[in-house]
């Protein structure tokens, strides 16, 4: 956990007082509603602590973002309104701008990445109607923002920043005013999802001004942790790449205003992985029968991580802001698969047993009464058999006990529960080892998921190198994941490594991965 708060200066105190005044007069309720602060009874029992969910996913655009967008746009003067506004967004901010544009009669040009979830693009068109023009550019929010800056210079429109604007921050800060009004009793901590930092900055500044004893903890996806890294470094950090699963918070660099405010007011930052996010989505569904988007479940994933590290407490409730529910339906398949892993309710192993009578019976005895979620086996050679197995567990303790049981039978075992290669690819393609892949190199790639993207990737592979293994599975997300085995003679390895580096896709060399060598390599 990253500790974030810095000692305030006189200038900081003045800026915070000014921001609190802005929050108190923010004009958000012309479009937004005061969202519910709901108990989560099932989670509260499980965690031994009262858990409350701030339901920003129930806003008219299914996200908190309309608060800041409207508060910024309603303050435009007559001349600015004539020239219109421009915004860049992966989706939720765009919906807020679109709704504000329709409400205020202001033309809005909204630049979105090609990879933006279709549900968000369609919502922007529906909310903005004739007042909104959409341009799809690039693969990320950063690409869209660069294009928006260029278009702004050409058109003279006012740029409505998704997070690094004091009026936007003030609009988002009204969430904190509501929390404090709705729960005047003991409050231990508020957990806030973080992308560029607008919501966290506004919430933290407000809470620390009015209830300084309440902890404010930001939560980021582990592969999009720009704010956490910036606070650790003491300056804004630019990430080379960001993971896109939690697309609403996939920001490479946080804002200047948001960084300064978070540096002053935020108590700590937490990082959570995709499995933990999926588990939190399921938790919210079980308590509310609502399905948040990945970024919308970030705060709860962090809350659960915090309780696991610090234990149950009776010194006040814990609040998680459920920030949005703009989920592509197809993505639910991936969420359901990974939620069990995120909750430590499924363990995945590769087990090697002797190819002899009685081995399989001993393997089943080691499993005991555990429910099997997946089982893949194919005879490998005359002496050994390799099994890929998924098992329902009640936590890390049972997982470790299973490993010990396998070892007691003198079976070789790889615990793959936390292994991304195994969870994404290997579990879907176990089919035996190949004796024809002696010179095979194995790489895992990510690429923007859009029509023709996979064909485009394949067309860039060098025609002189043979593809010996390939796995792709559509996860309903805005980026694709593939696993590729390519046969490359030893003499051509330097040339191949230079080639891979020029492809332009994030990649991981998995050639030495133990599960690959055990289950698929000859």
Image: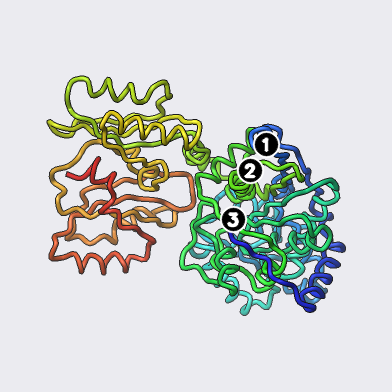
Mark 3 or mark 1, whichever is nearer to me? 1
Helix, strand or loop at disc 1?
loop
Mark pair 1, 2: CA separation: 8 Å
Label 1 vs 2, first from the N-terminus: 1
Residue 224 visible in the displayed image: yes
The residue positioned farthest toward the front in the image shown: 408
User: In the rendered view, does 18 fall on the left or right side of 287?
Assistant: right
Query: Which residue was labeled with disc 3?
Result: 270
Q: Is residue 517 left or right of residue 181?
A: left
366 vs 297: above or below: above
Q: Residue at x 70, y 58 (%)?
A: 98
Front residue (pair 262, 156): 262
Q: Disc 1 vs disc 2: Cβ atoms closer than 8 Å?
A: yes
Position in image of residue 38 (x %, y %): 76, 39
Taking the image as shown, residue 417 lies to the left or right of residue 211, namely: left
The answer for how far apart the CA atoms under marks 2 and 3 are is 16 Å
Residue at 31%, 67% in the rendered image: 501
Residue that numbered label 2 is attached to = 311
Q: Nearer the viewer, residue 25 or 37?
A: 37
Image spot of residue 140 (x, y percent): 51, 62
Decide: marks 3, 1 in contact (CB < 8 A)?
Answer: no
Q: Please tell me which of labels 3 and 1 falls first in the chain.
A: 1
> Is 315 in front, or is 355?
315
Which is more N-terminal, label 3 or label 2? 3
Q: Residues within 10 Å of mark 1 (few under 14, many from 20)?
A: few
Q: Give the left or right position of residue 124, taking residue 38 as reference.
A: left
For this rendering, which residue is in front, 96 or 489?
A: 489
Which quadrant would residue 475 be assigned to in this image?
top left
Q: State the mark number for residue 48.
A: 1
């Amino acid at each position: 956990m990253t500790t974030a708060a810095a000692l305030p200066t006189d200038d900081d105190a003045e800026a915070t007082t000014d921001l609190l005044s802005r929050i108190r007069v923010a004009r958000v309720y012309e479009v937004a509603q005061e969202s519910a602060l709901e108990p989560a009874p099932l989670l509260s029992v499980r965690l031994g602590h009262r858990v409350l969910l701030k339901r920003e996913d129930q806003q008219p655009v299914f996200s908190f973002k309309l608060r800041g967008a409207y508060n910024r746009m309603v303050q435009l003067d007559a001349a600015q309104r004539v020239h219109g506004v421009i915004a860049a967004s992966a989706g939720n901010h765009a919906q807020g701008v679109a709704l504000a544009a329709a409400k205020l009669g202001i033309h809005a040009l909204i630049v979105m990445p090609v990879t933006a979830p279709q549900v968000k693009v369609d919502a922007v068109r529906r909310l903005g109607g004739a007042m909104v023009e959409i341009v799809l550019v690039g693969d990320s929010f950063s690409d869209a923002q660069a294009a928006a800056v260029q278009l702004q210079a050409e058109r003279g429109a006012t740029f409505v920043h998704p997070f690094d604007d004091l009026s936007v921050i003030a609009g988002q800060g009204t969430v904190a005013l509501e929390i404090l009004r709705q729960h005047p009793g003991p409050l231990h901590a508020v957990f806030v999802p973080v992308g560029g930092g607008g919501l966290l900055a506004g919430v933290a500044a407000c809470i620390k001004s009015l209830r300084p004893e309440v902890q404010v903890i930001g939560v980021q996806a582990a592969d999009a942790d720009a704010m956490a890294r910036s606070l650790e470094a003491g300056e804004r950090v630019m990430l080379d790449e960001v993971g896109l699963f939690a697309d609403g918070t996939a920001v490479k660099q946080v804002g200047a205003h948001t960084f300064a405010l978070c540096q002053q007011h935020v108590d700590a930052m937490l990082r959570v992985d995709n499995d933990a996010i999926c588990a939190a989505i399921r938790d919210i569904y079980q308590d509310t029968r609502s399905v948040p988007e990945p970024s919308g479940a970030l705060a709860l994933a962090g809350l659960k991580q915090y309780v696991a590290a610090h234990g149950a407490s009776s010194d006040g409730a814990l609040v998680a802001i459920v920030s949005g529910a703009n989920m592509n339906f197809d993505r639910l398949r991936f969420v359901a698969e990974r939620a069990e892993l995120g909750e430590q309710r499924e363990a995945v192993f590769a087990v090697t047993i002797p190819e002899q009578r009685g081995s399989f019976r001993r393997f089943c005895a080691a499993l005991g009464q555990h429910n099997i979620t997946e089982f893949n086996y194919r005879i490998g050679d005359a002496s050994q058999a390799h099994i890929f197995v998924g098992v329902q567990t009640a936590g890390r303790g049972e997982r470790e006990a299973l490993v010990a049981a396998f070892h007691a039978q003198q079976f070789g075992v790889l615990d793959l529960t936390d292994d991304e290669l195994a969870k994404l690819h290997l579990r879907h393609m176990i089919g035996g080892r190949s004796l024809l892949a002696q010179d095979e190199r194995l790489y895992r790639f990510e690429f923007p998921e859009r029509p023709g993207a996979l064909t485009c990737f394949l067309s860039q592979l060098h025609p002189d190198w043979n593809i010996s293994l390939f796995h792709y599975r559509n996860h309903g997300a805005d980026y694709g994941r593939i696993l590729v085995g390519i046969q490359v003679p030893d003499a051509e390895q330097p040339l191949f490594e230079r080639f891979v580096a020029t492809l332009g896709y994030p990649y991981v060399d998995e050639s030495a991965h133990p599960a690959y060598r055990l289950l698929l390599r000859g």
